[in-house]
Amino acid sequence: MKSEQQYIDLYTQASQLIKSKSVKVMNDLRDEAFMNFKKLGFPSKKEERYKYTNIHSLFEPNYGLNLNRLEIPIDPYKTFKCGIPNLSTSLYFIVNDQLYTKKLPNTYLGEGVIIDSLAKAAIHYPELITKYYGKLAKTSEDGITALNTMLAQDGLFIYVPKNVKLKNTVQIVNILRSDVDLMVNRRVLIILEEGAEGQFLFCDDTADDRKFLTTQVIEAFVGNNAHIDLNCLEETHTKNVRISNAFIQQESYSKASHNVITLHNGITRNMLNLTFKGQHSECFINGCIIADKEQHVDNNTLIDHAAPHCQSHELYKYVLNDKAVGAFAGLVLVRKEAQKTTSIETNRNLVSTNTARMYSQPMLEIYADDVQCNHGSTVGQLNDAALFYMQQRGIDQQEARTLLQTAFIYEVIDKIELDSLRERLHLLVEKRFRGELNKCNRCKICK
């Protein structure tokens, strides 16, 4: 209980300060979340969904928190360039957990579209935020979600009204900035009303060579006949710990695309809970993970078919080198009422060294009798015959390895809907395998 106790003591002593620097909608759930955290604690490796990551050890260090909401001295528009340029996006920055509002993109996204700080939106649109905030992220079911809910003071709010299609892709760059080791607790609330459409790109980056621990909870509501395209790209550093829980709920005739791309990190744990609440809906869930050194990437997904006539397509691919550790556990749950379900779940992994480790656990749990579902997993090494063939034609071994690894991961990249992002990732993936990503000049870390 050592790792939990410091957060229990923190909230006991500072709950009034936390509430005074936040807003009523978030505060209304805070005490209940605290009680649930005390009951649940951090999940252990004995729990099925957390068996591949030691959560307790990640929270044991003593990180600082910006509970007083001190202003962070940075102008990201002047000092930071994202690794995904020239996408013709509407660009926003979140510094730690707070939307940077001193300068915002001067673009028209659509009638009635709202993109704002979650805390500010809760003041201006309290009924709207109250209707959705915390409704998918249940603090009684997960200790990380409970911790985030009790400590988070701000975040991002995105609202797309009925039948509105975003004019531009919305790009959110999450920058971690601090002079000391820091813990950040961030919330994201996305609402797409009936018939709405939106493409989003979230980029996680660091601006300082410090140890960061980030918890993030994303709640996304996709209305009837709505379409969300949610892309999450991580390019941080080896001192970074990132734990993200995403919750997506789809209504009838909706479509969701969710792509996770991890190009550089320290320790990453992503959890996705997607629920088909309405029938005739479809989702595409993809993951592209490249890890080396002693990096650790754990993806855990649950696709809940709670309505009939829905389709889910899931593909995660890992390439692991050195002493990297990868884990994928995906459960497709087909409830009794979810007849006419179609589901494909695939996890393919390339382990390029004898010291890297991959854990793969695709699962099906089916209670309906009229379904088409399959799942599969492979873990292998580079094909020696292919390497030999390429070397026979004048390609040196290292170049041959790079080409084979790049071709392996492109299957996931090519499924991304956003054309400009897909093209840029082709370049970034190749640079990553060549060890060139850490040689750019876009931030202090890279110098």
Image (cartoon, rainbow, N blue to C red):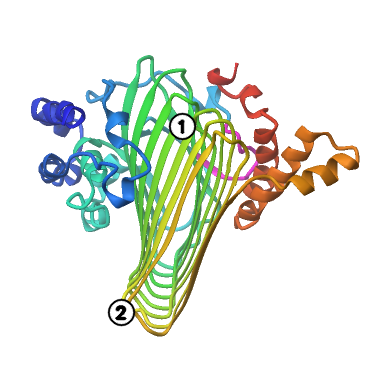
| Image quadrant where residue 435 sits | top right
Mark 1: few/some/many CA within 10 Å (<14, 14-19, 20+): few
Q: Is residue 134 above or below residue 165?
A: above
Q: Quadrant of the N terminus?
A: top left
Q: Would you say the residues marked 1 and 2 are in contact, meaning their CB atoms lie under 8 Å apart?
A: no
Q: Residue 103 — which label?
A: 1
Q: Is residue 376 above or below residue 181?
A: below
Q: Quadrant of the C terminus?
A: top right
Q: Secondary structure at mark 2?
A: loop
Residue 281, position as x, y percentages in the image: 44, 73
Write the residue at 26% across / 51% down: 125
Q: Is residue 436 left or right of residue 222?
A: right
Q: As rendered, which of 211 and 185 lies closer to the eye?
A: 211
Q: Is residue 240 above or below residue 217?
A: above
Q: What's the residue type where badge 2 is placed?
A: Lys
Q: What's the residue type where badge 1 is placed?
A: Lys
Residue 120, position as x, y percentages in the image: 28, 40
Residue 317, position as x, y percentages in the image: 56, 50
Q: Is residue 110 left or right of residue 52?
A: right
Q: Which residues are magenta?
A: 82-91
- Number of numbered labels in the structure image: 2
User: CA–CA distance between discs 1 and 2?
Assistant: 50 Å
Q: Does the segment drawn in magenta span residue 261?
A: no
For disc 2, the marked residue is 336
